Amino acid sequence: MKLARSSTRISRNPLLAVALVAGIAIGAATLPSMVWAGGLAAILGLAGVVLFRGDRWRTAALLLSAVAVAVVLLDTLAGWLSPAPKGQGVVYAPEHHSWVVPDPLLGFRLRPSNIVHAEATRGQETVYRADYTIGADGWRATPAAPAGGDTYIFMGDSCVFGQGVADDQTLAAQFAKANDFKVRTALVAVPGYGPNHLVRAFEVGLLDRYLGQPVRAVVTWIKPQDLARVTGDETWLASSPRYVLEDGRLRYTGSFTEHRWRNPLDGLLHFAGEHFAFIKAIGMRQRQERQADVFVAAIERLQALAREKFGAPLIVVYNWPDKPGLPEAGTEFDRQALVAILERVRRLETPLVSVVDLLDGIEVSRWTIPHDGHPSALVDHLVAVELKRRLNVAAAAP
């Protein structure tokens, strides 16, 4: 009888352990966040304390529950300290993945020959409605221009793309309008791009179609959120181009996914950081230093590529803090660090246009699309007018 009871005990505990692990795995796959999954793990661990037989099994179950509770508490605290994401509570339709498609060179591109009827809502409130016309070349349409007119290339992410504004309200369109539609504008921009995408677009020849045209300037727009993109620290960037610094120069290494498969430890840390805020906070200072170095090197590389390809200047529009002060919303960097990074960009002698300076005296509520955070059509207009003024001054200089 003792032997029979012992065999029953041996088989019961492993079966319960398998059921417990399966329950945690199902919770991790189906629950809305890893915090919920951690709470489930804590509850199942306590259930194991009651159901398991033997002190070692019960101790292991109690340890599992304690670790799960600690993870939930740490992650909740880290979540409170993390910046709130832009557009929180806003529902976008159609979702980006329906009109932004995979691309072997840049990770993702706009679906060519397409009109997107975009709408964003927050509860019962309409945040914006806008149509995005995507041309056969895979870039957003810009106004027609006379043959042989000067060309200006606008490169960037959703700010340059004009998310939330109509085709005729984008920065590129308003620049063309400010110049009486006598110039040609190209809008090489996709929501979610970072400077690494722009460098890669140059390097793989996606802008070679403009060779032979009178390209007078390449314009891009930077903001602190771009820093996380150059190291692939956003959920949508897995297939995007990855660059590292070697001897002070950028080197393309493939996509972030390829790097993480080749370096499983980096991949595991990235995966854990995506799901647990307190893990992402580990080594934050070193990660920020790497982001700053790659970001500045990418801007320098863009400047060099614009000169090499077109003999044109790179002009950087920036929505970036100029002075130390309160923490900057939407980024892990403090303002002092951001000011230092901008100063490094300024030392490249890249022409800079400050969005904040242009908005001096204008009511803050008019700066961005409410609840969404993207630049308003008014901002695009002011930047376009300033770019026209700057470029005219440059053209008149000896």
Image (cartoon, helix red, strand yellow):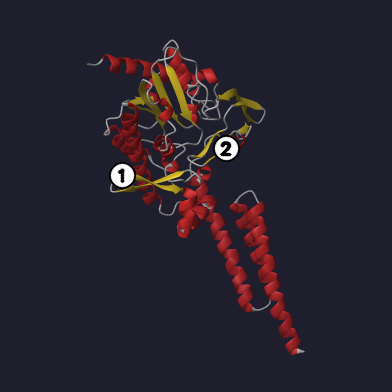
Q: Is residue 394 above or below residue 155?
A: above
Regarding residue 33, the answer to whether it shows in the image is yes
| Label 2 packing within 10 angstroms: few (<14), some (14-19), many (20+) | few
Which residue lies at the image location 46% right of the left edge and 45% below the top edge?
Answer: 232
Helix, strand or loop for disc 2: strand
334 or 128, nearer to the observer: 128
Regarding residue 379, the answer to whether it shows in the image is no
41 sits to left or right of 311: right
**How many badges with numbers are in the image?**
2
Question: On the image, numbered disc 2 is attached to which residue?
Answer: 101
Q: x and y percent of residue 179 in the render?
A: 41, 12
* Amino acid type of the residue tagged 2 in the rendering: Val
Q: x and y percent of residue 77 in the render?
A: 51, 50
Helix, strand or loop for disc 1: strand
Q: Is residue 92 above or below residue 395?
A: below
279 or 155, nearer to the observer: 155
For residue 124, which quarter of the picture? top right
Q: Residue furthest left?
A: 398
Q: x and y percent of residue 34 in the render?
A: 59, 53
247 sits to left or right of 22: left
203 sits to left or right of 24: left
Which residue lies at the image location 74% right of the left edge and 89% below the top edge?
Answer: 2
Q: x and y percent of residue 225 in the render?
A: 44, 38
* Amino acid type of the residue tagged 1 in the rendering: Arg
Q: Is residue 326 above or below residue 363?
A: below
Q: Specify the quadrant that holds the N terminus.
A: bottom right
Question: On the image, numbered disc 1 is attached to which residue?
Answer: 249
- The CA span between labels 1 and 2 is 30 Å
Q: Nearer the N terminus, badge 1 or badge 2?
A: 2
47 or 184, nearer to the observer: 184
| Label 1 packing within 10 angstroms: few (<14), some (14-19), many (20+) | few
